[in-house]
Amino acid sequence: MLNNISSVLKRHWDKILLATGIITYIIVLTSLSIARHDAFASRYDLSNMDQTLYYTLQGHFFQLRFPDELVSRFSIHADIILALLAPIYLIWDNVRMLLIVQSIFLALGAIPVYLLTRSVTKSKVVAVAMSAVYLLNPGMQLTNIYDFHGIALAIPFLLFAFYFAYIKSWKWYWIFIFLSLLTKENVSLTVVILGILLFFIFRERKIGIVSIIIGLLWFIAMVVIVMPHFTLAGNLWALEGLGEAGNDSLLTIFRKNLNPISFAETFLISKETLDYYILLLRQFAFLPIIGIPWFILALPEIVINVLRGTTSIVFHYDSGVIPGMVIATIFALSYVKRLFLRFKITKKYAQAGLYLATAMLFLYALRVNYHYSPLPTTPSCSCYIYNVTPEDREFEKALQAIPRDASITASLEIRPHVSHREFAFNLPSATQSAEYIALITQNRMVSNYNPKEYENVLIPQLMDSIKHKLIFKSEHFYLFERTSEKSEIHNSGGI
């Protein structure tokens, strides 16, 4: 018996470590994501994603309430993957299911990282270490913690797509390219870059050209035709307000940056941009710099983030960057071994050099995770966002006691807890008509637990109103029920 166990461990130690890392990640990040939600620190994005799944199951395909009306999700983003995920609510009709699924998908991204690294470096040790570096990435963990976003799933999908391209398994390549395109409209630009690399580096001319064409057509179809069609104004909100004056179009900004001086100021000289590059690269010990040309897979998303000013790893904006960074790091490690061999150093010492570079990468990843991750092990952890108080639990019970067919308008932090119903709104919407009004008196964001202005003005008015009854009150939470069909709350919030 012991001999059999020893034999299994000896033959499959790498897969056991990989599975252990994946399971640990799922448990830890799921627990933290749900704790953040239970502490009423999840917000607007989670409720929007949640409502899209909920309404799809109710027969309103890819729709949500935004802000007062039922609209197509296409008016915001083309993250069609949300509609495909709707059946998960048949397993458990709860927004926490989204948080669980996100953690599982991101954790499973360690599998293509392991497989690709092993194929490229021919080393189980390096493959296991690289999968650990992937799971330790603070940017991805922060994306995991910050609500749910369809584009987060592009991380494992693009990694799987690249791996299957590397081993020339084209059926699986196209499956994961298709899934990647469904996560968000701009991922199609990464598919274009991947097609270029396939054409020139892998010399897969046909696959490369088809990937380029599909990526370009998808981007044009979504951004130029489909999304503007579903917006009320007929233009795409994401392309507005990008300039210094807040009203430049994307085309205007690109024209400005064609000027060499403007380009240098935006992408090469700006302190904010340089700090952003450092944020992205230090998670991988700056190895992606030498992982050329694979590093360019991250460029479309980097360019978009720099132009839009979303240069942060705290939210989900680095989701499209991470796959390129990971792939570039894997190839950078293989270049280390090649460098040793080029200088006619024996294969034995070349392998030792590869192990040394991998060890340095792993230790650096541990250090970066220790200082910048959202984990409780981080000294600067804003762990109060995971602190679920008795007050939070009591208010959750009060919210779940509200009939499912009742309408409710709520503060941003509360709406994700009540959005599985036909009429769930964000304040100040529907204050004239909602049967219930749920409020929290403080913001609940990292570094911002300050009092809410609108809610703290509205609460005294509701307390004085004969048309509303206070049914729950604690230090930070209030829940009012409308007692009269004729109650009127003015658009300003007054009673």
Image (cartoon, grey):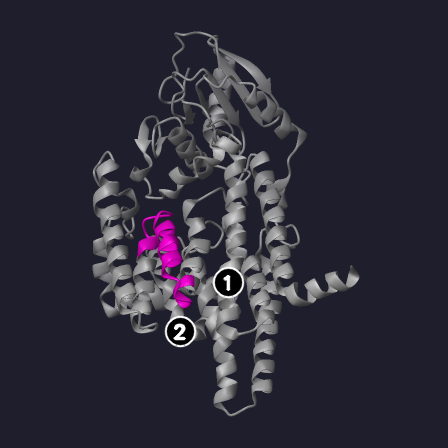
In the rendered structure, are the residues bearing label 1 and label 2 in contact, judged by CB atoms less than 8 Å apart? no
Looking at the image, residue 72 lies above or below residue 341 = above
State left or right for residue 184 relative to residue 233: right
Residue found at x 41% / y 20% = 431
Question: Is residue 51 visible from the viewing direction of this image?
Answer: yes
Front residue of this view, candidates 407 and 13 = 13
Per the rendered image, the range of residues in magenta is 164-188
User: Quick check: 259 above or below 455?
Assistant: below
Query: For the point 50% across and 45% down, which residue is it?
Result: 102
Which residue is labeled 2 in the image? 292
Residue 111 higher or lower than 427, as above or below: below
* Horizontal and vertical percent position of residue 260: 25, 70
In the drawing, does residue 410 fall left or right of residue 216? right
Q: Work out whether mark 1 precedes mark 2 in sequence or the reverse, and give the earlier one.
A: 1
Mark 1 — residue? 113
Q: Amino acid at mark 1?
A: Val
Residue drawn at 40 percent across, 29 percent down: 57
